[in-house]
Image (cartoon, grey):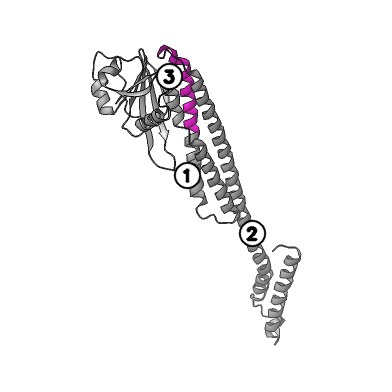
Amino acid sequence: MYYALGEEGIQKVKKREWESLEGGVGIFDEESFLSEFYLKEDHSIHQNPGAVFFCRLEHHANYLFCTFHIPVKKKEKRQYVFSLYLLPGKLIFVDEGEVVMPALEKIRKRGEGKPYSPDKFLSEFLMSFIEEDTLYVAELERTIADMEEMVLKKDTGNFTFQMLGLKKEISRFYCYYGQMINLGEALAEDGSDYFKEREVRGYQLFMERCQRLQQEIQVLREYAMQVQDVYQAEIEIRQNSIMKLLTIVTTIFLPLSLIAGWYGMNFEYMPELKWIYSYPVVIGVSVLIVVVSLCYFKKKKFF
């Protein structure tokens, strides 16, 4: 797909018109890009747009090469990946139609009739990826708050699994915003050789918003750690309660074990062995020990 950028906004054009334009956007899938540019020996673009694992900008002799690795929200497994080539006045996207085309159409409808330069379009294009991230960060915060309530209500069945997934999600977006900040800085500094009309303010706004989002994500990371500390404290309290109970039981039955061991020796001249009231007395002493122990522990508020 070929688009022209100019005073009339973003207009769809044919290939021949696009090649003669001073400002334009081209969108290709990987197969069409390879056949159009990559396999031509006389063209300056020889970068393979294949696997993409992070957002970054690379400098080449006649163009800038950007890779985008956009994390998909709502805890989906896959990521959005695409590449961008910056030529003088031209933006060439390599994408399978999942990201770039919807973003371009959204910008096109929103800015219908407004003048667009390649630099302005690129800054708005970058901004489109983080427009709704504030809401997603707020959703993550609510999730952490719900998990905190679960801990306080002692409903912690899947807490460890949920917290692990949440911390991975937070770390994923923290790295993503850092990469986007670096990318925006590189575009603001190095785009002068490729764009006649500079829109540096757009990149500055983009970087400022990414920085705020990264700061909010960092706050969420600290909040998640605090909730995890509360969970660990609750686990320790439960363990202490169990150990306290076991200690009380052990303390109560220790003298009973002593009595059982003492009279289990069966020495020949033990007078209690032939006394008719020996058995009831031992039972009474054992019960008295248990009652006295329980009263003592209750008075000391051990339970």
Mark 1 sits on what residue? 165
Q: On the picture, is 80 further left or further right than 275? A: left
**Disc 3 from disc 2: Cα separation:** 64 Å
Magenta segment includes 191: yes
Residue 77 can be seen, yes or no = yes
Against 246, residue 82 (above or below) is above
Secondary structure mostly seen in the magenta stretch: helix
Image quarter where the N terminus lies is top left
Question: Which of pointers 1 and 3 lies earlier in the amino acid sequence?
Answer: 3
Q: Is mark 2 on a helix, strand or loop?
A: helix
Q: What element carries label 3?
A: helix
- Give neighbour class at mark 3: few <14, some 14-19, many 20+ (Cα, 10 Å): many
Question: Which of pointers 3 and 2 lies earlier in the amino acid sequence?
Answer: 3
Residue in front for this viewpoint, 115 or 102: 115
Question: Which of pointers 1 and 2 lies earlier in the amino acid sequence?
Answer: 1
Residue 103, picture quadrant: top left
| Amino acid identity at mark 1 | Gly
Mark 2 sits on what residue? 241
Name the residue at 72% across, 77% down.
285
Residue in front for this viewpoint, 98 or 259: 98
| Amino acid identity at mark 2 | Ser
Report the span colored magenta. Answer: 174-198
Percent position of residue 82, x then y:
36, 29
Name the residue at 48% across, 49% down.
161
Q: Looking at the image, how many numbered discs can be counted on the residues?
A: 3
Q: Which residue lies furthest to the bottom in this view?
A: 276
